Image (spheres, rainbow, N blue to C red):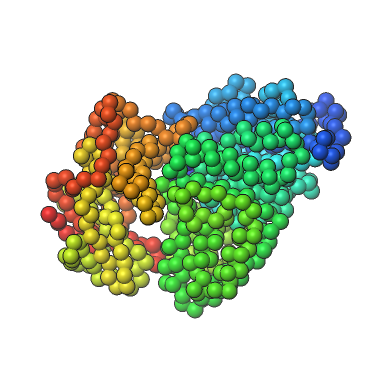
Amino acid sequence: MKRFCILFFILIILSGCADRHPAGQRAGTLPVPAAESDAAPEQSTSAKESTFTLMWYVNGSDLESGGGEDYGGAFSRNLREVLSYLPADDRVTVVIFSGGTSKWETAGFEADINQVHFVTEDGLAHGERLPEGSIADPDTLAGFVDYVMKARPADRYGLVFWDHGSSVPIGFGLDELREPRSINARDIARGLEAGLGGEKLAFIGFDTCLMATAETAALCAPHAGYMIASEELEPNAGWNYAPLMRALTRDPSVDTLRLCRIVADAYYSASLELNPEELITVSVTDLAKIDAVVSATEAFALAAKSDLDAGGFAGISKRRATVKDFGGVNESADMVDLVHLAQRFSPKYPKESKALIAAVKSCVAYNRRSRTSPNSNGLSVYFPYENEPVMDGYLDVYLAMGFTEAYIGLIRSFSAELRAGDADTKRTEIPVEAAAGGYKISVPDGITSLRAALLGRESGDAYYIFSYVPGAALNGKTGSAALPESWLTLNGVLVCAYTESADERHVLYSVPVLVNGRDMNLMYARDGAALYEIGATPDGDEDTPALPGFLPINAGDAVTPKYPRVSLSSGREEDGYYLGETVGVTDGGLAPEFSALPGGEYYFAFCLTDIYDNHFWSEVIQIT
């Protein structure tokens, strides 16, 4: 859920992962209310008497508080969905852990403390204050799980994690109040082992971003039957809880896989109803089959490690650069789809890749993905390449997580070579030549991909990107790009359009702008010749707004295009934005269209990426 800027998420919790827990903040075992413990019903396996307790581990964070912005209350909206189908009797109970936020929008939820709440046939009841401790501490998780199993014993249990999510080394949570701020899969597994006391959950769900990973599944497998999660970011609305509650209240003995599919379908359908262009993935993993995935990943990693040791880094890096990764708009969490990874390496390791693909497809019991998120097959794996802050701050954490030893060895060696090749100077003066309808460049060895950009000149050697040029191609030692006849404009003003996804007829664009001074991305879709606006989603350190997921652009709004500044010495877009001409929105809205390039002074250059993920800018030439 809960779209966020990955780099910002990394930076604000970077210190929290190294220090597991400050002294004196361990949660311990939570007390059990005596009256409820004494009155615990006898367990029964009959359909009529079958009981189900759903644990909801909620870290409200800025998703509920709003973080000073206007997008808060996300949990309270999901809570209303839960309350729309109250249990018919005491066979179904929802127990909520609340913490990690400075403000709740639902009365009875107290800020600055950990608290328990119950949803029963009588409605919502607020329970006692729980021992202090970060929601990202495995002891806090263990205490809550132990508390629930004693306070609300049942034949089956489900557990849902609700908050932000990030790449495997970082994991779940963004506690606004305490350290540590996030908890990775290793420590989630530790908390479950301590809290469950040998019991097993029917399912574990992550209503968060980026948690449908092989590592999470493997570490949680001893403690649950199925896992529901997303490979990609989730929109702010997250799951739709009403169908889950309806299924449980109608039949508490409902088959677990069927229940998981209901959750997945509800999330998928509701998300795309709000926005048909949303990047949506959701999968149900059969954790009883994850061992086969781990074994196949080990065999794949051993083949790749042998290749790497024999000097094959360049070939591995080139293939890794083309694998489907996740992280949303203009971001990468270095989480790659496991099946697509195997497919890309199939020519090099055919036996191992085939076995890995088969194992994942058998393990993923159910998978849904939107057309805007192709090559999403249900499980991802961490493979560092683009996101340097994660690798710099969390690689040691990942290496110690306890995933398959062979894969850990591959990542350790690949990361070492990747870092060793990081270039101090990333400017090159490779000449750009005019070609029919565009430009071409002679590409040196070790280049994995290239882009072409239309630039503006701010002053001296300072440039900014007016727009990337679509269709730039790398063929052997030659790169080429043809300037298009039309460019995306808003009210006649050229904007920097990023292509988020594309197929034969459908293209999804994001455009960085300021809307009334707020950093946003305008989203547009193109179906054939038709171009239409989807809405605006916050950018930078802000989160996606509340329902319906995208903010409309209204009459009276002021929209200012942003153009990424580029540092030609470092090759990266890391110097902020150059602001363009502000457009006033009228009653007719903005007028997006593809039109001829507006008059002005323009420059052109290629940006090349090498096997170490260094980015080099070519010679910059002025165009007319």
- The reply, left or right, for residue 135 in relation to residue 54 is left
Question: Against 297, is 622 above or below?
Answer: above
Outermost residue toward the bottom in this view: 310
x and y, in percent, of residue 229 in the image: 59, 47
Question: Splitting the image into 4 quarters, where does residue 289 fall?
Answer: bottom right
Q: Residue at 28%, 26% (x, y): give it.
A: 587
Q: Is residue 167 visible?
A: yes
Q: Is residue 79 visible?
A: no
x and y, in percent, of residue 85 in the image: 66, 28
x and y, in percent, of residue 84 in the image: 63, 26
Question: Splitting the image into 4 quarters, where does residue 8 fall?
Answer: top left
- The reply, left or right, for residue 193 in relation to residue 340 is right
Q: Residue at 62%, 32% (x, y): give it.
A: 242
Q: Residue at 23%, 34% (x, y): give it.
A: 582
Q: Nearer the viewer, residue 129 or 83?
A: 83
Q: Nearer the viewer, residue 396 or 212?
A: 212
- The reply, left or right, for residue 584 in relation to residue 414 is left
x and y, in percent, of residue 223 in the image: 72, 50
Q: Residue at 36%, 71% (x, y): give it.
A: 446
